[in-house]
Image (cartoon, grey):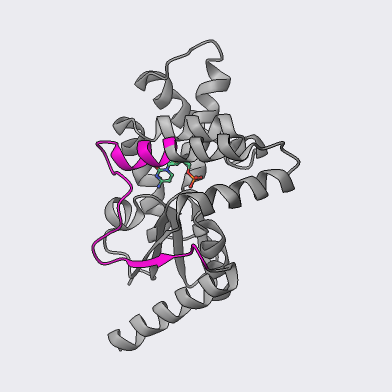
Amino acid sequence: MTSPVIAVDGTAASGKGTLARRLATALNYAYLDTGLLYRATGFLTASLYPNSEKISEEIAIEAVKAITPETMENPALRDEKITQRASMVAAIPAVRTALIEQQRNFAKKPPGDVEGAILDGRDIGTVICPEADYKIFVDADVETRADRRVKELRERGVDAIHARVLQDMRERDTRDSSRSVAPLVPAEDAFILDTTTMDADAVFATALEFISKRNESKA
Ligand code: DC
């Protein structure tokens, strides 16, 4: 029997990463931040081909093959330039296909002595793990998400301009939601969690309540 899988999808800076990490710790699940795979791909396209303006499918696939565990830990993956590049490579169908197996293997055989797997991303509940036991879709209004991102960047010592962050976030939302393959949409059976007026503790408590209610209805 395979262990349970929680799919957490949602928009940028909606709080999905924080939620997924907290759930993973509380439930002893292995956690995969799938955005890092796209970020690592975007980062490597830039470092392998610094003079190439356009990201071709060939370059992007070469970057996917070059990902190592060390790349996934590089703090530069969080830079705004790489954030936009991640969203661009994520719209290339061959990149998404090349990354499917790794994500599904993680869900099926989570590493370590754990109870299950939790993956966060944009298409976990719709494409990667459509059979996930629990699906949560996290969202918040775009102004609130931009506020959160500015705060996070400033805490990291980055001189962020609110209007610019908001514009980048809108562009990324549009690109992530309108791409032809695996666009950002909630799975039909996802629990929708709007975090606009919630803090991280309230988001965590609401998600835990959803999970225990699902368990009761399954029992
Ligand atoms: O979650 P994040 O902000 O780190 O994701 C970075 C980009 O990667 C985001 O713009 C969309 C893309 N992404 C995706 O298309 N599918 C995923 N499962 C995860 C991320």
Drawn side of residue 75 relative to residue 19, left or right: right
Residue 49 belongs to the span the image colors magenta: no
Q: Looking at this view, is 32 or 193 the one in front?
A: 193
Q: What residue is at 71 percent from the left and 44 percent from the top?
A: 154
Ligand 1 quarter of the rendering: top left
Q: Is residue 141 left or right of residue 180?
A: right
Q: Position of residue 78 (x, y in %)?
A: 60, 39
Q: Measured from the top left, where is residue 91 in percent x and y?
A: 34, 33
| Quadrant location, the C terminus | bottom left
User: On screen, 86 above or below 120?
Assistant: above
**Residue at 30%, 57% in the rendered image:** 186
| The one of 159 and 72 positioned closer to us in this rendering | 159
Q: Give the range drawn in magenta.
A: 171-197
At a point 43% along the width and 35% down the height, the residue shown is: 171
Please state the total of marks drawn on the protein image.
Answer: 0
Along the line of sight, the residue nearer the viewer: 101 or 86: 86
